[in-house]
Image (cartoon, rainbow, N blue to C red):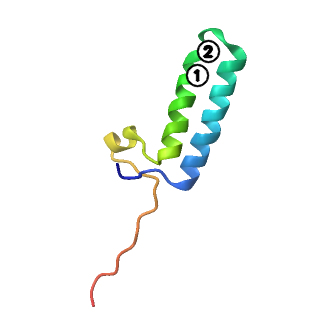
């Protein structure tokens, strides 16, 4: 898996994941869905890879510049 998330994207996902899991635990009941979304966000933040980004051809990871010519 090639990383397709930049640093800011990963931090935002991590914070949102922790908030989602915390809210699900605090609210209980049908809010477990929020916890599941939070868990997915934490996993994608930890790995730096988002499958949906791959499907959409999107990336927030900085592009490495290569030198061309001599």
In the rendered structure, find residue 48 and report the number of the disc placed on it.
none
x then y, percent, for residue 54:
34, 44
Question: In terms of secondary structure, where does tag 1 sit?
Answer: helix
Question: Which residue is pictured at 46% across the width and 53% down the height?
Answer: 60
Instruction: Return the residue nearer the eye: 49 or 56.
Output: 49
x then y, percent, for residue 49:
43, 46
Question: Which residue is pictured at 42% across the width and 42% down the height?
Answer: 50
Query: Would you place residue 8 above or below residue 38 in this image?
Result: below
Q: Identify the residue position indicated by label 2 in the image.
A: 31
Q: Identify the residue position indicated by label 1 in the image.
A: 34
- Give the tally of numbered discs: 2
Question: Which residue is pictured at 41% across the width and 52% down the height?
Answer: 3
x then y, percent, for residue 37:
53, 27
Question: In terms of secondary structure, where does tag 2 sit?
Answer: helix
Query: Would you place residue 64 above or below residue 50 in this image?
Result: below
Q: Are there few (<14), some (14-19), or many (20+) residues within 10 Å of tag 2?
A: some
């Amino acid at each position: 898996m090639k990383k397709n998330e930049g640093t800011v994207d990963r931090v935002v996902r991590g914070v949102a994941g922790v908030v989602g899991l915390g809210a699900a635990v605090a609210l209980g009941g049908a809010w477990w869905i929020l916890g599941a979304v939070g868990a997915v966000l934490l996993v994608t933040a930890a790995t730096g890879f988002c499958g949906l980004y791959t499907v959409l051809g999107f990336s927030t990871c900085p592009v490495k510049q290569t030198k061309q010519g001599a």
